[in-house]
Structures are given as structure tokens and as C-alpha cells.
Amino acid sequence: MPDQECTEQGSTLITGIGELVTNDGDRGGFAAMTDAALVIAEGKVAWAGPASRAPAADAVVDAAGRAVLPGFADSHAHLVFAGERSAEFAARMAGRPYRAGGILVTVEATRAASDAVLRANLRRLAAEMLRQGTTTFECKSGYGLTVPDEARGLALAAEVTAEVTYLGAHVVPPEFAADPAGYVDLVCGPMLDACAPSARWVDVFCEDGAFGADEAAAILAAGRAAGLGARVHANQLGPGPGARVAAEAGAASADHCTFLTDADVDALVSAQVVATLLPGAEFGTRQPFPDARRLLNAGATVALATDCNPGSSFTSSMPFCVALAVREMGMTTEEAVWAATAGGARALRRTDIGHLGAGARGDLILLDAPSHAYLAYRPGVPQVAAVWQAGRLVAGTGSLAARA
Ligand SMILES: [Zn+2]
């Protein structure tokens, strides 16, 4: 593919952009310009501005009036697993009880799987994400729940992303059912020691039936002492202490946030914890969606992520999450696209992604549509025409590029 080689070696001008979403305005939120152009060089955005003032470059892509967005930053995904749970989903949708369901089914399948099976599954999902415009994704462990299985999951995740999260505290595994405190000690001790070298983050599922406030705080403190940043699965299934624990731990993000009190919202806002909303989970479990409007009105920073996992949310599609957020959660199209790009970057404490200002990483999407609004306006329709990651065309058609 000569066009692709050309774009890899020199600078690329993308011009004729109908709408360029930069998220690079003075006020810090969604920002876009029309009739725009953008230059990528050496893996980064070198210039963005009006098409009429665009500098020359080694190669030119004519966007033909279509929209260009920052690549999506999916800050919450569980991709290291084996097996699938479609029968559990179908039973849930049919209103039938399904006894053999749940996280532990995936734990059993994951423990039994070879490295090769787990790696192939992970790479297939990562490729699926990239084709849909996700240029950065976070990946958690949490289906191993033994020292070697958690360490293996994180080492595999580190092969495909820098945003690796240790989630030994996903659930208490059956062999510790009679001794949950012993499992917390393992998570905070030998398991953490084995996992911290591969991880950037520590996460805990703080919920009834998983880990309580004191256990979650201890796990986050141990992770932070090992140099990991904190994130929390909070307030997904009902009211609880998760959001408060996240705020007190200085977590980057509290994820789910479906059942929040006013005090929870205040705590997230004042501690500057990103509220990461995962509408795929509510879709997949037929639960009420989180109230994004309430969080935004309170001044919270909101991110959107897929929660991609084989149980509650087996979608890898950020466009689907944007559509749900607009239709079901009170977000404008601008807010939802910001949350899926810059919001995800904030949830990962990254300043190099989620926007297309000069100096940003060259992570961008060419939509087969004239504006970002089409992501929600045409739900379920594949509209990602091309994807660049660190300045390289990595998905979509190279025939878009023409020699200057
Ligand atoms: Zn999750």
C-alpha cells in the first residue's frame, strides 16, 4: 500500500474537513471548527486551522466535507478472558433466572485457558476497538483471581496497551468464600507484588456482594503505596460507599455512578474525580441508565467508556455508547463526544490524547459523515471511515490518501 507508506514516513495534510472536533477551546469543553484542515507529522498533530491557511505536507487526504474527531479513549474495559455468556444474556432478556451466570463462570474459563487463547481473544477485541475509532483503551485483569492468573492477565494486557489496571478485587473467588478477609490480604500483599510491575492502575469493585468501603479503601491504599493510580467500580447496582471511597482515595475515576446521592455527586466534584459512565452495562442488564445531566449540571467531569466484558456489556463500540448517552442519559451530542474522547483522557490522567491541538498525539478518526452528531443520529451504522494512531493510518482505506 504505497499511500500508507507515504503517510508513515512524512507529514500528512488532511484537508476539506467539514467539521474538525479539536476539544481545544479556551473553555476546556467540546470545541470544533468548520472548513478545517490538520497536519500530522512525526506522530503528532503539527497544525490545525482553517483549510484556506493550511501549510503544505508530503501527502494529502481530502476529507471531502466529512468530520474528523480525536480518537476515542475507552477508559474502562475487561478484555482478558476466555469463553462467552450469550445464553446468560438471552435468559436475562427473556426474564428467566439463569443459575450458572456471573463473573465466576468467566473466571473458571479464564483460568483454564492457555496464554495463546487469551492473547488471541484480547488482540481480536483490541483490533475490533481500533476499527471503531478507539485509539486508546484501558484493560483490567480480574478474571484470574489467583496470584499467577492475575499476573498473567496483566502481562498480556501490557502487550496491547499502556493503560493496564490491576483488578484482583473484582470478586472474592470461591476458594476464599469462607475467608474474604484472607482474600483482601492476598490482593494487598503477594498478588499486588506480582501484578504492580505490569500495571499503571489499581481498581476495586466496591459494591454489596463484592468489597465494602473499608476493604476497598485498604486495597486502593496498598495499590497507591505500590505506585499505582486508583480507580473504583462505584455505585453500579445500588446506593453505596463507592463514590465516597473514590473521592477519599484521590482516585482518577469512579466508574458506573448509576446510583448516586447528592453527597456522592458533591464528593466527586470537589475531589475532581471523573465520573465514568458505562451505558453498555445498563443496556446489557436492562437497568436504569445513569443521570449524566445531573452530574454535568453539578460541575462533574464525565467520561464515557464501554465496560467491554463478556457478562454485562459485551460491546467494544464507543459510537454505541455515545448514542446511548445522548438518547438515554440527557447528554448533548457535543457533551457525549467530549466525554468519549477528552473525558476518557481525563479519566486516564492523559493530556496527550482526547484533543487535536498542536502537540497532541496523532490519534484521529475520519467519519463517513459531515458532523459528530451523526454518531448518535445514525446509531448502529458503521461510520468510521479511517483511523490514525500516533500519526499512522491503522484502519480504514488507504485509498483516501493521495500524493501531494
Ligand atoms: Zn467494569
Image: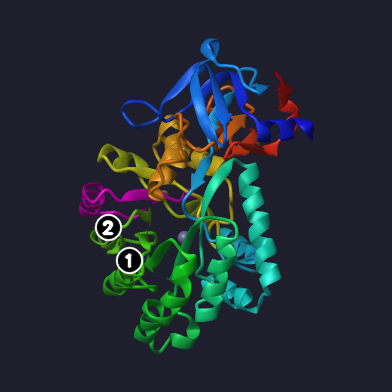
Instruction: Kindly identify which residue carries mark 2.
Output: 250
Could you say which quadrant of the image residue 57 lies in?
top right
Label 2: which secondary element: loop
User: Where is mark 1, residue-wise?
Assistant: 224
Q: Is residue 114 left or right of residue 148?
A: right
- The tag earlier along the polypeptide, 1 or 2, is 1
- Quarter holding the C terminus is top right
Amino acid on which disc 2 is placed: Gly
Q: Are marks 1 and 2 in contact (CB under 8 Å)?
A: yes
Image location of residue 60, percent across then percent down: 66, 21
User: Residue 181: image x %, image y %?
Assistant: 34, 84
- Residue 249 drawn in magenta: no
Q: Is mark 1 within 8 Å of ligand 1?
A: no
Is-magenta flag for residue 275?
yes
316 on left or right of 347? right
Q: Can you say whether 290 is above or below 110 in the image? A: above
Q: Nearer the viewer, residue 196 or 57?
A: 57
Q: Nearer the viewer, mark 1 or mark 2?
A: 1
Instruction: Please say whether residue 83 is visible from this viewpoint.
Output: no
Q: From this viewpoint, which residue is outermost toward the right?
A: 1
Q: Give the SS element for disc 1.
A: helix
Start and end of the magenta stretch? Answer: 256-279
